[in-house]
Structure formats: C-alpha cells, structure tokens
Image (cartoon, rainbow, N blue to C red):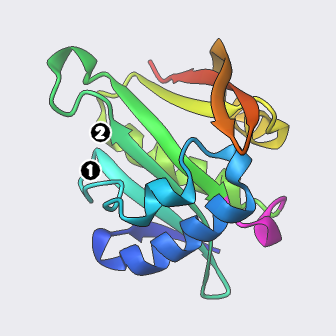
Amino acid sequence: MEVKEIYAQDSAAYKAFLLKGLVEDGANFRISPDDEKDAPFPTLGTPDSFTLGAFADQRLAGIVSFGREGRDREKLRHKGLLFRMYVHPQFRGKGVGRALIEALLARVAMLGDVEQINLTVVASNPAAKKLYEQFGFVSFAVEKNALKWKGQYYTEEQMVLFLK
C-alpha cells in the first residue's frame, strides 16, 4: 500500500471514489452526494491544506483530508481539522485507515505549530471512533440529532487530539 497526496488535478478519480462512498455509506458522512456533486476539491494542495489517498493494487482504497482551521484567522492557527476520512469497504480492517492517519499526523508534525486536530464522527460508526481513539483522539462534545438523512437522525461526536 502507498499513501500519497492527491491534488485538485486528480479530482475526477477522487470525486468518483468519494461519491461512491457517499451513496454506499451515506449515514457516516456530514455531506450528501448532491452536496458533493458540484463542490470544488476540498483542499488547496499546500502544507496546511492537503488530501491524502491510500492506494492498494493501483486502486484508491481510502482518503483523508486536513486543513488548518485558522488559515486566515490568527487566533485559530493552532488548530487543524481532519475531515472526509473514508476507506472503501473492501479495504477495511487491512490497515488503510491507520496508514492514512499516520501519514496525516506525520505531515502535520512537519508544520510545527499545530497544537490540536479536531474531527467529527457519526456516533453510530464505532469502528471509526475506535480507530481515532487508538491515535489518542478523545470525545469532547456530543450533538444529538446533528444530522438528518433519509428521515433518520444521527448523533455526532466531536473529537480532539492534543499534539502539544
């Protein structure tokens, strides 16, 4: 398996991969397929705004994005956001998610001034929550009925990893 950065020029493959996930695992995302259809690539391809892809057998197996929360806000520059984490069901349980988070954390460490990383996880996705907890993320807030998708409500948990 290889983890490497995905750029906006690779957005067609990225978007196809993510849209499939939004359809098949829609309850585990904050965005819907319609939200994503015409949306721009989620990151800027800079040291503090990037998307990583895990490739297995020349195929995209998983993705994750990172963005500095305070890119244009001095008081928030110490925080980052892990978002759009998705591993294709065929590759779950094979270390893809772990490899993506390890690579993301290594990239963030090179920035030197990010002190915490926040994320949001759907509470009914215990596998994702367990993976984040293995890296030291802890829950700090729960929002009941945070999402409503196809007539069903979903609770979200906010998690944080303190780096310093």
- Which residue shows up at 53% across the image and 50% down it? 84
Classify the position of the N terminus by image quarter: bottom right
From the top left corner, tell me how far across and down residue 80 is, in percent: 38, 31
- Which quadrant: the C terminus? top left
Q: Is residue 62 visible?
A: yes
Q: Secondary structure at mark 2?
A: helix
* Local secondary structure at mark 1: loop
Q: Which of the two labelled residues, at mark 1 and mark 2, occupies the earlier sequence position?
A: 1
**Which amino acid type is shown beneath numbered disc 2?**
Leu
User: Which stretch did the figure color magenta?
Assistant: 87-93
Q: What's the residue type where badge 1 is placed?
A: Pro
Above or below, 125 relative to 65 = above
Percent across and percent down for residue 118 are 50, 27
**On the rendered structure, is 5 left or right of 92?**
left
Name above or below for residue 104 compared with residue 90: above
Q: Is residue 80 above or below residue 19?
A: above
Residue to which mark 2 is pinned: 111
Q: Identify the image quadrant of residue 120.
A: top right
Q: Residue at x 41, y 58 (%)?
A: 51
For the point 74% across and 63% down, the residue is: 24
Q: Nearer the viewer, mark 1 or mark 2?
A: 1
Residue labelled with disc 1: 47
* Residue drawn 80% across the image and 61% down it: 92
**Cβ–Cβ under 8 Å for marks 1 and 2:** yes
Residue 91 included in the magenta stretch of the image = yes
Residue 111 horizontal side relative to residue 74, left or right = right
| Position in image of residue 101 (x %, y %) | 58, 48
Q: Residues within 10 Å of mark 1 (few under 14, many from 20)?
A: few
- Residue 153 falls left or right of residue 146: right
Q: Is residue 143 magenta?
A: no
